[in-house]
Amino acid sequence: MPIVPDTKNWTWVLERACPECGFDASTVAFREIPRLTRENAAAWMPVLERENVRVRPDENTWSPLEYAAHVRDVYGVMGRRLQLLLTQDDPEFENWDQDATAVAERYGEQDPAVVAAELREAAEALADAWEAVPDSALGRSGRRSDGSVFTVESLARYFIHDPVHHLWDAR
């Protein structure tokens, strides 16, 4: 059975702790994001080695493999958004339907070892990109098509909640 798409606007994670996973992005300093990105990627490795990595806990929840493939792709999407913020004035981010991507890319059928390698590589590239951002660029802004405005700094804090939350989901 297909997962019901998540249509929530998660921008509130910039203001308060997540009641589900407990992570509080509002307390995270921008310069912590590269370390947190790398730590998160490392924490996915034992998850992807589990015997039951393909098993959904129920019909409404992705398997750990599906969450890991999503997180790998989140790293890439956020890296592209960061580049837009750094190279364009007030860019509008391309919409990304994460649920359609999960179906089209067959997340649950991917090889966990390949996902692990790609996740590590994508995380390292994004962590390096966050590290390279000069302080003078932290306030550069862009927006989603729904009108939500992000600066480089708020995008980083918004981003980091996602892989942390999904690691909690895959517990």
Image (tube, rainbow, N blue to C red):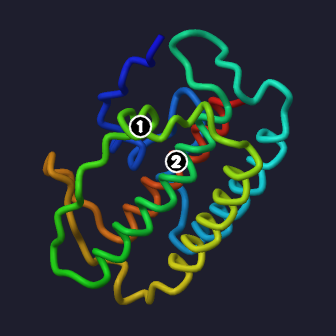
User: Where does the image place residue 7, in percent across and percent down from the top left?
Assistant: 30, 28
Rendered position, 83 above or below 32: below
Can you tell which quarter of the image residue 66 is in? top right
Residue contact at pointers 1 and 2, CB within 8 angstroms: no
User: Where does the image place residue 100, in percent across and percent down from the top left?
Assistant: 35, 35
**Residue type pointed to by label 1:** Ala
Find numbered disc 1 in the image and state the secondary structure of the residue it sits on.
helix
Disc on the earlier residue, 1 or 2: 1
Q: Is residue 23 left or right of residue 52?
A: left
Find numbered disc 2 in the image and state the secondary structure of the residue it sits on.
helix
Q: Nearer the viewer, residue 149 or 125?
A: 125
* Mark 2 Cα shell of 10 Å, populated few (<14), some (14-19), many (≥20): many
Rendered position, 93 above or below 25: below
Q: Nearer the viewer, residue 50 or 42?
A: 50
Q: Is residue 162 left or right of residue 21?
A: left
**Residue type pointed to by label 2:** His
User: Where does the image place residue 72, in percent across and percent down from the top left?
Assistant: 57, 53
Can you tell which quarter of the image residue 49 is in? top right
User: Where does the image place residue 149, in percent across and percent down from the top left?
Assistant: 21, 58
Tell me the number on the disc at residue 161.
2
Q: Is residue 51 left or right of residue 73?
A: right
The residue to which callout 1 is attached is 104
Image quarter in which the C terminus is found: top right
Q: Nearer the viewer, residue 79 or 133?
A: 79
Rendered position, 76 above or below 21: below
**In 3D space, how far apart are the residues under numbered discs 1 and 2 (Cα atoms)?**
24 Å
Disc 1 or disc 2, which is closer to the eye? 1
Q: Residue at x 55, y 19 (%)?
A: 61
Q: Residue at x 51, y 79 (%)?
A: 129
Q: Residue at x 20, y 51 (%)?
A: 148
* Mark 1 Cα shell of 10 Å, populated few (<14), some (14-19), many (≥20): few
